[in-house]
Amino acid sequence: MMDNFTYTGLPSRVIFGQGIITQLADEAEALGMSKALVLTTPQQKELGQELLDMLGPQSVGLFGNATMHTPVDVTNDALKKYRRLGADGVISIGGGSTIGLGKAIALHTDAPQLTIPTTYAGSEMTTIIGQTEGGLKTTQKTLKVLPETVLYDVDYSLSLPAIMSVTSGMNAIAHAIEALYAENANPVLSLLAEEGIRALIRALPIITKDLTHPGARKDALYGAWLCAICLGSGGVALHHKLCHVLGGTFNLPHAETHTIVLPHALAYNAPAAPDAMARISRAVGSEAPAVALYDIAKNSGAPTALRDLGMPEDGIDKSVAITLDNPYWNPRALDPTGLRAIVRAAWAGERPAPIPLNAATVR
Ligand code: NAD
């Protein structure tokens, strides 16, 4: 019998397809933008310039210095430019770093946001904004930062290199996996999560061999969108907690850290989340999905060991202690021995092994 549940939908308009960038000017106008500021990272400035050319007088300029983890000083520079040019909205083209900058501008100005995601990270579907200042990252949730319109144009994902496609795809899959066993899991998000994982798992091995495969790129972006809704409307658990701790403490790169940790966090939670595991197994096409995810990453050449990202060995105990100090809700209670075992395995790059339930971890 179905349990009671709560589902929170977030208001955003999504246009999905290939070549839909032709709708950019109309969609910007529909948001009331007549002086848009276009945002990119330094690496994607050329794309920003292309958008300026498409928009003509509807845009007032480009800010091309978006940076990972939304540093406050970069946001302040962008805000100065936004105000100086009299802009009335932002168009963010890029991954989570660029979208994060757009969100930060919206937080301060209520600017409407139109986003064109070029990775699978999923920030465009969430009310979450993380900002860094003086080495400290703080995160808040507010509807003010949710982008109003998202153009998922497959063309802009074609340039994502093979390994980044896999690590970013694993980042997306992690959102769906945790929504399936989060405290506020619900049947609607479970449908989206299963389908999102399935679409990405189908696509990633093809993309690693053929970067511009149109069907696989479409599947991957579609899957990433569904997984992003899971992050925006659902909950997270041990995996996201560990990634925040590891990323924040050792300054590890975002998508790679998710890719390495996910199989181990899943192996830890598997015995405590049988319904979620049934869906994940179906979507991944394996009775041992944690191992299958590890193998997909390894076979693509993605990193599988936290030590290869620069994490020191004594960071294992440190990150376990920080995680236990202020844990997120998790389907399986956290025990120091089991937790240390998975962090150590992730650090060393081992294949995930089953972590049997013991009396201390049965809820
Ligand atoms: P990113 O945005 O930092 O991009 C990484 C690099 O890849 C950048 O140099 C970028 O210019 C480049 N790039 C992006 N798309 C490309 C493409 N199609 N082709 C070639 N190069 C491309 O990486 P990310 O993983 O998308 O985002 C990570 C950041 O997003 C982190 O700061 C993370 O905390 C944040 N994030 C936030 C949320 C949220 O809900 N607030 C969700 C997910 C991620």
Image (cartoon, grey):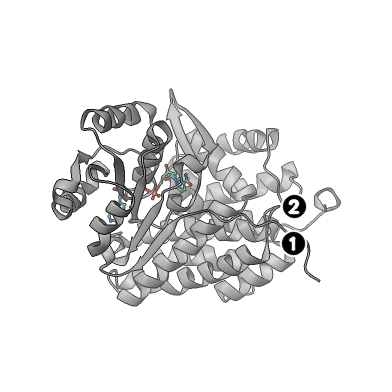
Kindly give the residue lying farthest to the right in the view shown. Answer: 359
In-image side of 346 versus 82 (left or right): right
> Do residues under tags 1 and 2 come within 8 Å of each other at their CB atoms?
yes
Q: Determine whether 58 is above or below 288 in the image.
A: above
| Residue 343 picture location, percent across and down | 61, 46
Work out whether residue 15 or residue 232 is closer to the camera in this orientation and state it: 15
Mark 1 is surrounded, within 10 Å at the Cα level, by few (under 14), some (14 to 19) or many (20 or more) other residues, namely some
Mark 2 is surrounded, within 10 Å at the Cα level, by few (under 14), some (14 to 19) or many (20 or more) other residues, namely many
Which residue position holds label 2?
Answer: 332
Going from N to C along the chain, the mark reached first, 1 or 2, is 1
Determine which of the numbered discs, if any, sits on residue 74 in the image. none
| Residue 225 picture location, percent across and down | 45, 62
| Residue 122 picture location, percent across and down | 45, 54
User: Residue at (54%, 71%) from the top-left corner?
Assistant: 195
User: Residue at (27%, 70%) from the top-left corner?
Assistant: 212
Q: Determine whether 207 is above or below 67 in the image.
A: below
For the residue labelled by badge 1, is the local secondary structure a helix, a strand or a loop? Answer: helix
Which residue position holds label 1?
Answer: 271
Q: How far apart are the two marked residues, 1 and 2, measured between alpha carbons? A: 8 Å
Work out whether residue 170 or residue 218 is closer to the camera in this orientation and state it: 218
Kindly give the residue lying farthest to the top in the view shown. Answer: 134
* Residue 350 seen in render: no
Residue type, label 2: Arg
User: Residue at (61%, 63%) from the top-left corner?
Assistant: 189
For the residue labelled by badge 2, is the local secondary structure a helix, a strand or a loop? Answer: loop
* Residue 336 seen in render: yes
